[in-house]
Amino acid sequence: MRTLKHLWNWFDDITGVSNWLVPILRHPVPPARKSAWFYVLGSATLFVFISQVVTGIALSSAYVASSARAYETLLFIHGTPLGRIVRGIHYYGASAMVILIGLHAIRVYLMGAYKYPRQMNWLTGAGLLLFTLLMVFTGQLLRWDQTGFWSSVIAAEQAGRTPFIGNWLGHFILAGDTVGGATLSRFFAAHVFFVPALIFLFLGFHLYLVLHNGISEPPKSGRPVDPRTYRRWYHEMLDHEGLPFWPDAAWRDALFGLLVLATIVSLATFIGPPALGKPPDPTIIQASPRPDWYFLWYYALLSVIPKWTEDWVILLGPLVFGLALILLPLLASRGERSPLRRPWSVVIVITIVIIIAYYGQVGHIAPWSPRLEAQPLTAEVVGASSGPVAEGAKVFYEKGCAYCHMVAGEGGIRGPDLTYVADRLTPAQITTRIYSGAPNMPSYTNNLTEEQLTSLLAFLDSRHRRPPKPAALPANIGESSPQRIPGGSHGETK
Amino acid sequence: MTEQTTLEGTPKETTRRRFLTRLSIAAGSLAAAIVALPSIGFLLGLRKAPMVWRSVGKVEDFQIGSTVEVRFLDPSPLPWAGVTAETAAWLRRVDEQQFKAFSVDCTHLGCPVRWLSTADLFMCPCHGGVFYADGRVASGPPPRPLTTYPARVQDGQVQILTSPLPIT
């Protein structure tokens, strides 16, 4: 031990490291009391980021970002248990980054810690949020599967909605006229070099600011921020009550960080990385692209808004959100910090969480998507294996109806369930609907022959609930008993 | 002992320092520019690929009134492009001599559309866009008909003109 001490003294003498390291470690932090565990989210995000860098470096030593070779290098990485675990850590770590940075932002926002003097903390943090989203997006293509591939096309198409420069922007993202050899390299360079460089820059500044301004004290109702007096008050408070960051506060960061990373590594070890499908082949049309879970809510939102608002939402949505993030510390830099005195902040956070959770679920179900894997109806469901009704069921499937309409639990949910359609619509009404189509249904005027229409109607008209048994009358009712109600639902003329 | 500190200096030294400051800033800016400009230019510049006629099959291989998937190679594909060097298209033989080639990219947001031959419809899996056999929008969110590639018949071969991915 004494040799180590000598070694350290020699090192410190010629570098002076302890002159700045010790103050950083021991810098005073306000006692957080009941809110102490809320403060671990920033450091947890940082630890996961470091984990991503480390696993990323490991992966980049084996991965070749060439469209021709990427798949084989992924097979190579998957060839060993450690390779699979490292890839798994990187994959689950990406989700963890999104979750933790979101929680951290919410915590800071609710505690009003973006107010004076920490406005720049918030602004650099907003930049880091943007870069994190860019990282998960570019990382998707590097996974080199169908979903990542088509997501890049869709992103280019969305960028293409930008007025004037849309076409150029879309092709710039793809690095060419089509998704080709240059696209993967571009995403790789962005994901491994360009965006991480920006992250390091912003992160360094972000951490410096935390030290410079001091970590915020938990807000208290009735104690608004006044820029004229805050710094003096803060430093006096630290003089009286401050605790050394290391280890009095840092232990929570260490424990929670361990918990988060242990969760990620466990997922990677026991569940494993995403399976390697076929390499993304633009000529494989049988693809059903879906974004990763953290973008599902956005995918759902874009799918449910009216068509005419699409361009506006795609372009202005992110811009408005970004502007809101930037303006927040500039316009609301003083005043009450406690969420109890800022009820709108609570409303906004709850609304955002509900929107993301709800639309994430909707995006998962994707009711607007045809169920192209639907199977033809069985004879049991149809109720016949030959004759016009069976023929009609065949037409129902061949014409694509089943992809959007469900019958007895088989089929799509884009359109109304037709299991009992004969209870609601007459054949004449059904014919009208088939011929005229609807905003979300094609018109079959030119796609159906007379015979096909006839069998189709026979089939659809057979779709009704069994008529209820007529009600039994008591035995001793006289001649003037009322007529029995006829069976069948609406007594329509056929 | 009341010498002027070297930080303030005489008026001559101040002028000299101002000049040196400007010189250093100018030199640094120039150094940054001569590295950054070519790099950014390379990054932003797109190599315009030539449009080339690619054969996708013999005329008699295609039935009149049917739509099939064809594949063709990008013009001057990069040697490392691998699977991504090919593009798919839906080719429809309209009559004896006329062919129509549709891009597989849905005009809504770019997902690949599937051809349902028994239904005579293109269907997009992403948001439920539907197109008729001639490319017109049948229903759903797509704003425009399917983009077509120029197609021709040359020496008994059906050819498609390679084109950039339709973005707007």
Image: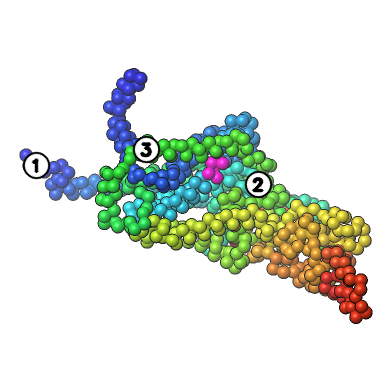
Circle 1: residue type: Glu
Which mark is in front, 3 or 2?
3
According to the picture, the residue beneath numbered tag 1 turns out to be B3
Considering the whole magenta stretch, tell me its main secondary structure. helix
Residue at coordinates 14% horizontally, 45% vertically from top-left? B9
Q: Residue furthest left?
A: B1
Element class at badge 1: loop
Image spot of residue B8 (x, y percent): 15, 46
- Span shown in magenta: A92-96
According to the picture, the residue beneath numbered tag 3 turns out to be A248
Circle 3: residue type: Asp
Quadrant of the image containing the N terminus of chain A:
top left
Q: Residue furthest front?
A: A476
Residue at coordinates 51% horizontally, 57% vertically from top-left? A350
Give the letter of the chain under mark 1.
B
What is the spatial separation of the Cα atoms under label 2 and label 1, in whole angstroms? Answer: 75 Å
Look at the image and say whether residue A429 sits in the magenta stretch.
no
What is the spatial separation of the Cα atoms under label 3 and label 2, in whole angstroms? Answer: 48 Å
Dot 2: within a 10 Å radius of its alpha carbon, few (fewer than 14), some, or many (20 or more) residues? many
In terms of depth relative to the viewer, which is nearer, B95 or A403? A403
- Residue B121 showing in the rendered view: no
Image spot of residue A411 (x, y percent): 76, 57
According to the picture, the residue beneath numbered tag 2 turns out to be A146
Image spot of residue A156 (x, y percent): 58, 54
Q: Is residue A67 above or below residue A456?
A: above
